[in-house]
Amino acid sequence: FAYHCFCTKDELEAQRQSQMTQGFAPKYSGKCRHLSASEAAAQLKANRDSVIRFRVPETHVSFTDMIRKKITFDMGLVGDIAVAKTEREPFYNLAAVIDDEEMKITHVIRGEDHLANTPKQIVLQRALGFTEPVYAHLPLIFDSDRSKMSKRHSATAVVEYRKEGYLSQALLNFMALLGWHSESDKEIFSREELIEAFDLGRVQKSGAVFNAEKLDWVNSQYIRQLSNVELARELIAGGFAPERTENHEITKVAGLVKERMKKLSDFKTLAAFSFELADYPTKLLIWKETASERIRENLRSAITVVASIKTTSFTKDQLQAALQPLGEERGRGEVFWPIRVAVSGNEASPGPFEIMEALGKDESLRRLELAIAKLGENH
RNA sequence: GCCGCUUUCGUCUAGUGGCCGAGGACGCUGCCCUCUCACGGCGGAAACACGGGUUCGAUUCCCGUAGGCGGCACCA
């Protein structure tokens, strides 16, 4: 089945070069194949550098891939492959075949880059009398420039993505969608649903380009499915929440910005205003062309209304019900916009009522007063 | 160079001879909702690589060409 080969690396390399320039497939010449046992023993005794080669039969080898159906290779083009350095040091193909047999592997599911290894492994299996597992070669995943995502790169990438605030379930779901599609057009799956629906037979044959925007979308879907408590837990565990902040505080704010988040790391910027009001330009309080005097009046009236609400029923529904008449009377934009800016300090934010509920009565009033003071500075 | 795999909107894909004047999703975009942003709702633009066959009829089957990718180690 196998024999010692004493060809040097330089010889082999030179051979390969000349074969390639002549337009042939590079393969081992078979030079040491016919060495007699005694010749080989002598070489070994002389400590000549060697390797063990397997006599690859010059036949066609076919196998059925679960994804690509029947695949045939002409082994005559391969030549005798090196399977081990010594009897105790097998190379990859031999080691893999023996491992799989000993571990009773039934299915070998791996990347398409292993396709050319498969016939070599099959030929070894047959020679050793091993059972042939079923093969499935998955398409590769490419970067946006269409180059292969290297193993080393993607291994760290998963960790990197987790650090950026992508949920593991979302990552899994997104990866499943790269090269596979459910019969039902469904795209967001729970772990159980995915196990149920996934089918190797439906896997795409060509490689897929990694689409970061879709990952964002999938992740945002998962974030929204989380309860506020669960989301807070993820935020705290991942280090995305500000330190020294009460859990229930995080929970409250998490609910506020949940549907605006694409990844956990967004929380920091999205929720910053609720922990501390940043300075903002006074003119941000002005709704369109409204006179600042009028904005001040509106805020004054709003304060009166807000102050009249009991601390115990300081909810967004109560706030909305109480402030709605004022909005209708003086113009919704002229009333709600400045309130929202006053409590958030941002041009874009969640609605004013929910923010006030999260802030609580005292802090809400403090921020409203501050806005009036800021407007006063201009006069 | 040789071998293998592969080829539907920008991207991920549905599609297995007539249901396709090609469906869904992300992204992009118009309108609605609305105090802003986001969410949500309703629309829009956007693709069968090319050339030959086979067939009454090809996105679907066959052949070729071109493109993409992977593999060609005394690495794994």
Image (cartoon, rainbow, N blue to C red):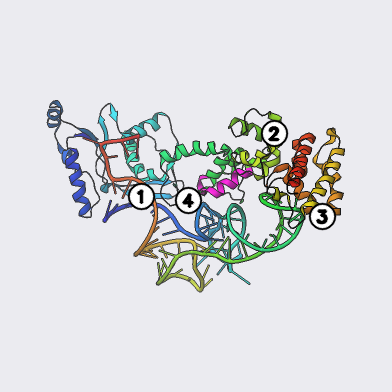
Residue hosting label 3: A331
Q: x, y percentage for residue A362?
A: 79, 34
Q: Earlier in the sequence, mark 4 or mark 1?
A: 1
Q: Disc 2, disc 3: CB below 8 Å?
A: no
- Give neighbour class at mark 4: few <14, some 14-19, many 20+ (Cα, 10 Å): some
Cα distance in 3D space between marks 2 and 1 = 58 Å
Residue hosting label 4: A209
Q: Identify whether A20 is placed above or below B42.
A: above
Which stretch appears magenta? A199-221
Question: The disc numbered 4 marks a residue on which chain?
Answer: A
Cα distance in 3D space between marks 2 and 3 = 33 Å
Q: Is residue A213 magenta?
A: yes
Residue hosting label 2: A251
Question: The disc numbered 3 marks a residue on which chain?
Answer: A
Q: Earlier in the sequence, mark 2 or mark 1?
A: 1
- Whether residue A94 sits left or right of residue A374 in the image: it is left
Q: Disc 2, disc 4: CB below 8 Å?
A: no
Tell me the tag on residue A72: 1
Identify which amino acid the numbered label 1 is placed on.
Answer: Thr
